[in-house]
Image (cartoon, helix red, strand yellow):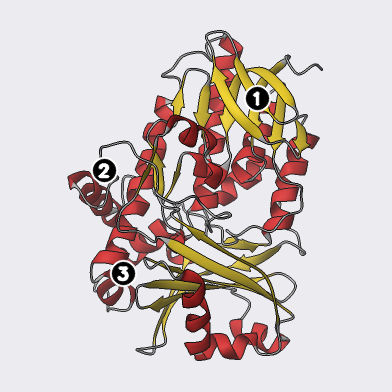
Amino acid sequence: MTDSEWDVLVLGAGPAGSASAALLAEQGHRVLVLEKQQFPRFQIGESLLPVSLTVLERLGVGPREDSHVFKRGAQFVSEATDDCRVFDFSRALDGSPRHAWQVDRSRFDAALRDRAVQLGAEVRHGVSVARVECGQERVAVHTDTGDFSARYVVDATGQGRLLARQMGSAEPYPGFGHAAAFAHFDGVSQEVFDEIGPEHDIRIMIVPQGWGWVIPLPRRRLSIGLVTRRRGIAEDLEQYMAESPLIQRWIRGATRVDGRAVRNFSYKNQRPHGGRYVCVGDAACFLDPVFSSGVSLALVGASRMTDILSAALNRGQEHDAELMQPLADYMQRGYDAFAGIIDRFYHTHFIKHFIFGSLREERTEREIVSVLAGDVWRDDNGFQQSLVSSRRRGGSRPPSSLSQPSEQTEGEAPH
């Protein structure tokens, strides 16, 4: 096949890109994926939500011992006040999946990429995209290895958000986390993993000016990170780990590997679709990693996008600039729900009253768990409805003027 015979060019082979490619190829379309990096590669965003399980089942990508560990839910921990509360996904409203997975992203992403290839997509690594031109008849993608042409392009470039940068359409979310630093620790003792328990909950650590995470991963590895609204993030991470008795005990004797820092990662792409293009995953929106929504929302969005695009390609109507408006409307409901709970996390007494407080009604707890599980497209969740209503009344929505974040992203943000 020549480089001008593709139906769809997918930019990026992360979860959103590989899922998009796999599902489009499965439906008989000619798909080429262009990925800048070589696999395997280090990536943060290891804590999945239950909402992702339906998409993974559709893809035919199941858990593997070397890349997945069972995830019961989330534990919120405040060492300063000695508070701890477990939110168990099995307590969600009826109809929501009852668990999730913690994943080794290098292996998880490779498995999704390999599934796309198995279903008929072609993937080329080491290709850096410079510019995209969407014309009336086709799309031209200019790269460092040559030019490519297709009927449609899917931007799944993650935090690189290629089209948003090209169009100047990324708007920051004020009031969310500004920076993150993180590292992995290998060779964590079996005694620590016995203490963590078979539930393998993510620990969300409540700290001044932000929050931290501790994620148990396969092969006795821990992912530890910090998100703040401050700028000295690397120094803050060191202080956070040094002052946490739990972390100090858990990493004793372990080897630190794969560290990184990122800044200015909370944003919304105000032009996520148009004639012959759509942005999915982080290329469309990234909120804040506190509730681990990134990868799961990316998979959900990719799955719905492929159904719309496949039908349009079959009809010869993929040029329609409004083709993906139903997808944008659907995903906005999810973004508003998570943005609403992030607003409350940072700017209200939500932690005191809802996380560590005594909830008067069992139903309220189940509604909160459903949101934390990513089951945010239902009409019977009063807590979710209050989150969305508060967003529509104002909240911390992006400002109306188009502007890009003032600093460039360093690396990939956690999901």
Q: Is residue 387 above or below residue 126?
A: below
Report which residue position mark 1 lands on: 142
Q: Are marks 2 and 1 in contact (CB under 8 Å)?
A: no
Where is residue 371, by image quadrant? bottom left
Which disc number belongs to residue 399?
Answer: 2
Which mark sits nearer the N-terminus, 1 or 3? 1
| Left or right: where 299 falls relative to 400 | right
Q: Nearer the viewer, mark 1 or mark 3?
A: 1
How far across and down, in percent of the image, does residue 291 sit? 44, 61
Q: Residues within 10 Å of mark 2 (few under 14, many from 20)?
A: few
- Per the image, label 1 sits on a secondary structure element best described as strand
Quadrant of the rendering where the N terminus is positioned: top right
- Per the image, label 2 sits on a secondary structure element best described as loop
Q: Is residue 43 above or below residue 12?
A: below
* Number of residue marks: 3
| Left or right: where 391 falls relative to 111 | left
Report which residue position mark 3 lands on: 362
Q: Nearer the viewer, mark 2 or mark 1?
A: 1
| Left or right: where 410 falls relative to 8 | left
Look at the image and tell me whether residue 33 can be seen.
Answer: yes
| Left or right: where 155 falls relative to 194 | left
How far across and down, in percent of the image, does residue 46 sit? 60, 61
How far across and down, in percent of the image, does residue 409 sit? 51, 52
- Per the image, label 3 sits on a secondary structure element best described as helix
Q: Nearer the viewer, mark 2 or mark 3?
A: 2
Amino acid at the residue labelled 3: Glu
Amino acid at the residue labelled 2: Pro
